[in-house]
Image (tube, rainbow, N blue to C red):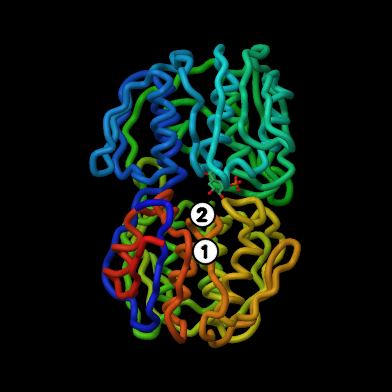
Amino acid sequence: MSKNVRFKVQPGGSIKGRIRVPGDKSVSHRSIMLGSIAEGVTHVSGFLEGEDSLATLKAFQAMGVQIEGPHNGDVTIHGVGLRGLKKPSVPLDMGNSGTAMRLMAGILAGQDFECELIGDASLSKRPMKRVTDPLRQMGAEIDTAEGGMPPLKLKKGQPLKGIQYTLPMASAQVKSCLILAGLYAEGTTEVIEPAPTRDHTERMLNGFGYAVHTEKLDGSASKMTVTGGGTLTAMNIDVPSDISSAAFFMVAASIAPGSDLVIEHVGINPTRTGVIDILKLMGADITLENEQTVGGEPVADVHVRYAPLKGIEIPEDLVPLAIDEFPVLFVAASTAEGKTVLFGAEELRVKESDRIQVMADALNAVGIHAQPTHDGMVIVGGKQQVQKDEIQSHHDHRISMAMTIAGLTAVSEVVIEDCANVNTSFPTFLTLANQVGLKVTAEQA
Ligand code: S3P
């Protein structure tokens, strides 16, 4: 797809069938990063062939790691060990991916070569101070653009030293960045998170035989501890399907009368299942079937049947556990009976777009009363009206997909501009959407 793709959605229909969505984006990034710095050959299956995770793959190839694939989700990584990466000859382009840039910054801060991390228009506006501040405390030398934005220029700084750092926000990217830098640091690195965030880095490092200890602290905080200078030993990784991609179809099946859908092999790591909990609180009919553990990550088939939804106040402790799913949860709220209130979610303002403002504008464009607040949104569920304003995705894949799902309950065609970005995380979205009963076409804008 070229950069200017417009989605057109015809309303109506129900969502039926059995589908498998592509591999988890967070796990896919980490599989390449850890496989590359491990000793030995790592085989990955179910790898997400989206632009974001491919950017990570290409970055490690540019640092001399031999990587074969992806072929139908299979990737083979010939690990070079913690100290085996080579200076890339060009800046490393992280595209649209905040995860790639922030986690790579942790690994690159520990190298004895200089390099530069760059990104696209959306990534170039996202805050990086949250990683550069603590990395500098560890001894790294990093230049940024004004305001701490990308590009990041990592200099040959001092050898890193372990620190204790309390995260100012619940962020798995910052936590992971510091744990990865901690592999290269002298002594012990301790990262304290105020609330649970996705723990794929910790689980995968332990899988590679590198101990990361997690200790529960008072309240909802935890401390992760890692000591530098160890070795990762190659392993095989089966990437579960991405719950963040599955979420679009969970909401679709929940809001379209007559729906009955099974989404197979979805990762249900408890740090990621907030979307299921929130939808259930709203009255959704979701059951987990065939639960099992693959490569240290729990998976299940998610069975969703239509059920009328009601508005709720979203419990604040579920926010970090559903952080990527709010665009489509706002769509669910727009169909619910009554008012849905979200607060404590200011992080949404610094995602691929300002997801609070952009989704409020998009829902207002189809006649839904959505009022943005500084850290959330108030949505009054109701019937949509004929689309009156343009809907722009603002370089954000999850806006494109969430508003496609909103088209199911529209009163007339919904048109969304700038949708090629679905390729960053979910290249098969359009095919699967039409397969289960949505009516979406893509045209060159
Ligand atoms: C991610 C962490 C989250 C999430 C992002 C992926 C990760 O970001 O929004 O899509 O893989 O660690 P934050 O850490 O900024 O919340």
Q: Nearer the viewer, residue 357 or 104?
A: 357
Image quarter hosting the C terminus: bottom left
Crowding at dot 1, Cα within 10 Å, few <14 / some 14-19 / many 20+, comes out as many
Looking at the picture, which amino acid does disc 2 mark?
Answer: Arg
Q: Position of residue 25 (x, y in %)?
A: 43, 46
Q: Quick one: SS at disc 2?
A: loop
At x 47%, y 22%, the residue is: 90
Residue 298 in view in this figure:
no
When the figure is inspected, residue 314 is found, relative to residue 171, above or below; the finding is: below
Q: Which dot marks residue 275?
A: 1
Mark 1 and 2 residues: CB-CB less than 8 Å, in contact? yes
Mark 2 closeness class: few <14, some 14–19, many ≥20 residues within 10 Å: many
The answer, for residue 430, to whether it is visible in the render is yes
Please determine whether, in this image, residue 298 is positioned above or below residue 129.
below
User: Helix or strand or loop: what does disc 1 sit on?
Assistant: helix
Residue at point 64% right, 57% down?
Answer: 354
Q: Which residue is mark 2?
A: 272
The three-letter amino acid code for the residue at tag 1 is Val
